[in-house]
Structure formats: C-alpha cells, structure tokens
Amino acid sequence: QVQLVESGGGLVQPGGSLRLSCAASGSVSRINAMGWYRQAPGRQRELVAHITNSGITTYVDSVKGRFTISKDNSKSTVFLQMNSLKPEDTAVYYCNVILGWRWSDDWGQGTQVTVSS
C-alpha cells in the first residue's frame, strides 16, 4: 500500500506552464514505475504519462512534445512538467504507481489544473 500526495496544480492561461509533483510513501520499495493520470469532467480517467525506475517514459499522443515526466528515485517523487498548455488539458491530475506489475488501487486526492483565459 502506498500513500500519494499531489501538488502544483492551478489556473494558467493557454500557452502557459505548470509543474506537478507527487510524493509517494509507504511501500515505496515495491514501486516499479510512477505515472500521471487525468480526469476531465464527464470523461474517463486517462493515463497521461508514466516512467519506469530505469527511466523509460511513455506519453499519450495528445501531450507528446509538451509534457515531460521525470522521477526522483531517492525521494519516490514524480514530476510532470507541462508546457504549452491547452484548454483541453483542464482536468484533475492524479499520480499512481506500479507495484509489482500492476497499477496500485491507492489514489491521491488529485490536483486541479485549469487552462483558461
């Protein structure tokens, strides 16, 4: 079991940037990867990006070239640098971790990102 705490969301104008952070605690020795999901109103939660302990990253097509995921293994923290933000990026952003070979059932409270002029 892990505890996840996200931070860094806010209101930003289109084209702006935000950096999200997520700190994991608890069974961190079992973490094989960390990732960011987002959920917009009326839509399903989607995986935005994830990064393995070895640094391999994947991104959903809609954020490629704009978002960068990174990880501090020593602190069990994952970051999401979001540049060139668009209104369609508006959502609650959640982090999660892969324990063993599956995503954890534990979620943090999320952090709201609103992109609007």
Image (cartoon, rainbow, N blue to C red):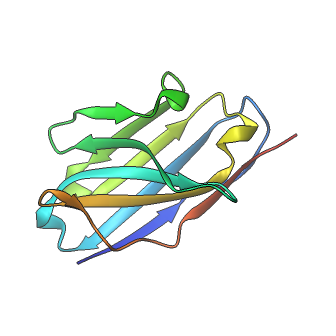
Q: Quadrant of residue 5?
A: bottom left
Is 34 left, or right, of 16 in this rendering? left
Q: State whether residue 15 is above or below residue 105.
A: above
Q: Residue furthest right?
A: 117
| Residue occupying the point 32% across, 72% down | 105
| Residue occupying the point 29% across, 52% down | 34
Point out residue 7 in the picture as x, y percentages from the top left corner.
53, 61
Is 31 left, or right, of 81 in this rendering? left
Q: State whether residue 85 is above or below residue 65.
A: below
The quadrant of the picture occupied by the N terminus is: bottom left
Is 87 left, or right, of 5 in this rendering? right
| Residue 35 in view of the camera | yes
Q: Quadrant of residue 75?
A: bottom left
| Residue occupying the point 20% across, 59% down | 102
The quadrant of the picture occupied by the C terminus is: top right
Point out residue 61 in the picture as x, y percentages from the top left corner.
48, 27
Q: State whether residue 82 is above or below residue 76.
A: above
